[in-house]
Structures are given as structure tokens and as C-alpha cells.
Amino acid sequence: MTCPRCGSELFDGSSPCPQCGYADGPAAAETFSRYAAQNEDALNGYLSYTAGSSNGSSENRSAEDPYISSEDRSVRDRDTSGEWLPYASVICGALSAYSSPMILPGILLGITSVILGIIGRSSPKKKLAVIGIIAGLIGLLLSVLVVLFYIGIFKLVYDFLFGGFGFRMFSGW
């Protein structure tokens, strides 16, 4: 069964329409017509919002929609463009620490984590941004320590081979 007013699907036994409030019977019709006469603009705005957009976007919804509370309106109108930055900073910092033995990815992810954390400090998740900055700095430090370790190992091998311990020892034979 469909509603004669808005055309939405009605479930069995449901007298008032869940979309527009239309109900069967003379008393219900009179109540609805009185409500519709008083709230025609609001009802038309609501119907155009519910029937006009299939993807759920708010392009048909006016700012004066009476069916939206002020809390819902503030959530809908909130700027969420930079709220992902602290999360990305923490993820890049963790990946930087994890990939520090590969040096270049560790350094690049560490720098990215620090930059995203600094920019993300202006979002409501300030503590998370600071954690991302610290994680990025730890990843950078680990990458630098790995570089120093590799340099030390190469220096030891070089000194062993060419510094008197390796081939020079056997050169008298």
C-alpha cells in the first residue's frame, strides 16, 4: 500500500504515513488537513528533502528545516576538513618507526608525520597530533641511528680488510 499524499510505501496496519503523517479516515484526514494548512511550507520542504534526493545528500534541505534540531544542524554544518590530520600523523609516525631499518621510508614517513602533526594541532584532537609528532620524531631518530650503525659496520669491515688486520697480515707470504 502506498500513501496517497507522498507516495511512500506503507507497512500493513500502519495508519499514519511515516513520511508525511497522512492517516486514513475522516477524523485523521481533517487533522492532517488542518496540520497541512498551518505548516504547508515546512511540510513541502520536508517532502522535497525526503523525496527529492536519492543519495541522502542535504542539497534540498533548507537551513530553516523545522525537522532538524540545532544540535543536528551544528553537526551538519561543522567543518571536518582537518580532523583526519592527527590520525594520519600517528599512522605515519608508527610506520616511520617500523620502517626505520629501510632508512629512506623511515625518514620520509617521519618528516610527513611531524608535518601532519604540526598542522593537525589546530584540530580538536590536539593530544593525538602531539602523539603523532612524537612518533614521527622517534621514527626519524631510529632511522638516523640505523644510518650510524651501518656506517659503523662498514668502517669496521674496511678497517679489518685494509687497516692491518685483514690482507696486510697475509701480505708477507
Image: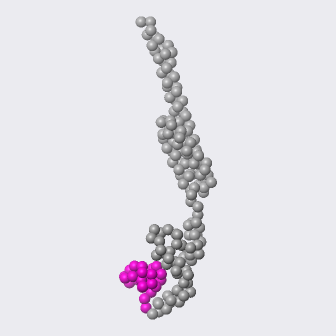
The residue under the point 55% across, 48% down is 89
Quarter of the picture holding the N terminus? bottom left
Q: Is residue 89 magenta?
A: no
Q: Residue 160, relative to residue 4: is it above or below?
A: above
Q: Is residue 7 magenta?
A: yes
Q: Is residue 119 visible?
A: yes
Which residues make up the magenta segment? 1-25
Q: Residue 149, relative to residue 26: is it above or below?
A: above
Magenta stretch, main secondary structure class: loop
Q: Quadrant of residue 66?
A: bottom right
Quick one: 69 or 55, which is closer to the camera? 55
The residue under the point 56% across, 42% down is 111
The residue under the point 48% across, 18% down is 160
Q: Seen from this angle, which residue lies furthest top?
A: 173
The residue under the point 45% across, 79% down is 18
Quarter of the picture holding the C terminus? top left
Q: Residue 160, relative to residue 41: is it above or below?
A: above
Q: Quadrant of residue 145?
A: top right
Q: Seen from this angle, which residue lies furthest bottom?
A: 26
Q: Is residue 42 left or right of residue 3?
A: right
Where residue 25 appears, as percent x and y from the top left, is 43, 91
Q: Residue 50, relative to residue 90: is it above or below?
A: below
Rendered image coloring scheme: one colour
Where residue 151 appears, as percent x and y from the top left, is 52, 27
Q: Is residue 147 left or right of residue 170?
A: right
